[in-house]
Image (tube, rainbow, N blue to C red):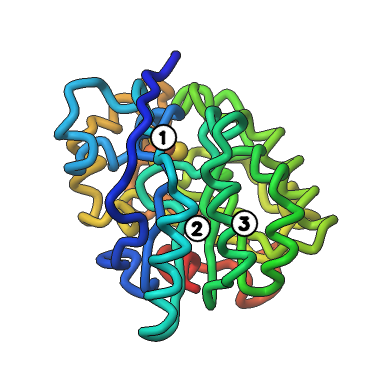
């Protein structure tokens, strides 16, 4: 689906980390809206989306003059104390249009010049590989968190048809590992996956974060329930995966394969 693209000049870029992101000093969204339009995305119920008439996934605002604004805000924030940034909380910083617009890249350039104490780059797009040169310069102050909800691409297509295939996300993780950029696989929200999933990720990442709708949607699963997610599970005959205990299937499988302490749950997996 094609998204409507609008250019906007933001008043602020760094927002205070609150709620699920309370252990970050700031969140940073280079775009508003998200072309990936995942079925389970709870951002569609947040004010950023509900104020709009268009359906979530059909619009993207491109923030202009963002680098200059971040330079100033980062300088000010660093003067006040530790700066830990979560990019991004209500969009994916590697929107398809980022290829051309380079907003996220321009923000990374600012952060290379004047590094925050920590930056988490949360994405599901292989486009992150384009910025490996900048990520390398941030050394251990950065971690790329690549969403890989399942190893089964037919499941991914059912829930997030507009998002990049699993295979290209794994390839991006391989490139990040080869380049020495700290990275983790983020299985969030868990979708039905196979027994072989941990073995697929083990050569690519040393760290995994597991999260689900109940721990991770900021409302104990209520937002997800309002989205009617159970219907998609029913269609697949996989309702047992739409259950507060289902994360244990994935968590236990990964714990059996990954070194102790490297499989993290929900908020601790995203922590700086
Ligand atoms: S990529 Fe993230 S922000 Fe975008 S629709 Fe999917 S869950 Fe929502």
Marks 2 and 3 sit apart, C-alpha to C-alpha, by: 30 Å
Which of the labelled discs sits on residue 109, or is there none?
A: 3
Marks 1 and 3 sit apart, C-alpha to C-alpha, by: 17 Å
Residue 25 place in picture, x, y as percent: 37, 73
Name the residue beneath numbered marker 1.
Answer: 62
Determine whether 83 is above or below 92 in the image: below
Which residue is painted at 50% across and 67% down in the image? Answer: 269
Which residue is painted at 44% across and 83% down in the image? Answer: 82
Badge 2 marks a residue whose secondary structure is: strand
Name the residue beneath numbered marker 2.
Answer: 210
Determine whether 135 is above or below 79 in the image: above
Horizontal side of 204 relative to 90 (left or right) equals right
Which quarter of the figure is the N terminus placed in? top left
Query: What is the quadrant of residue 40 in the picture?
Result: top left
Crowding around mark 2 (Cα neighbors within 10 Å: few <14, some 14 to 19, many 20+) is many
Q: How many marks?
A: 3
Is the CB–ligand 1 distance for label 2 below 8 Å? no
Nearer the camera: disc 2 or disc 3: 3
Q: Is residue 156 visible?
A: yes
């Amino acid at each position: 689906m094609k998204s409507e693209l609008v250019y906007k000049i933001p008043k602020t870029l760094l927002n205070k980390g609150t709620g699920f992101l309370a252990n970050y000093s700031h969140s940073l969204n280079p775009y508003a809206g998200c072309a990936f339009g995942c079925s389970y995305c709870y951002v569609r119920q947040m004010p950023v989306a509900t104020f709009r008439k268009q359906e979530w996934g059909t619009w993207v605002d491109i923030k202009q003059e963002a680098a200059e604004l971040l330079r100033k805000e980062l300088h000010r924030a660093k003067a006040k104390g530790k700066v830990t940034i979560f990019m991004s909380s209500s969009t994916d910083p590697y929107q398809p249009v980022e290829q051309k617009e380079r907003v996220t890249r321009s923000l990374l350039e600012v952060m290379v010049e004047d590094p925050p104490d920590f930056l988490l780059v949360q994405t599901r797009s292989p486009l992150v590989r384009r910025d490996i040169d900048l990520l390398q310069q941030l050394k251990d102050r950065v971690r790329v968190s690549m969403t890989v909800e399942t190893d089964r691409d037919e499941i991914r297509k059912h829930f997030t048809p507009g998002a990049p295939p699993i295979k290209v996300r794994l390839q991006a993780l391989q490139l990040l590992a080869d380049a020495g950029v700290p990275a983790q696989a983020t299985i969030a929200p868990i979708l039905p996956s196979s027994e072989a999933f941990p073995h697929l990720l083990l050569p690519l990442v040393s760290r995994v974060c597991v999260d689900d709708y109940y721990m991770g949607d900021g409302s104990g699963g209520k937002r997800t329930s309002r989205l009617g997610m159970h219907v998609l599970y029913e269609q697949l005959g996989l309702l047992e995966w739409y259950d507060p205990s289902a994360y244990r299937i994935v968590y236990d499988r990964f714990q059996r394969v990954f070194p102790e302490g490297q499989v993290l749950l929900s908020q601790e997996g995203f922590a700086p």
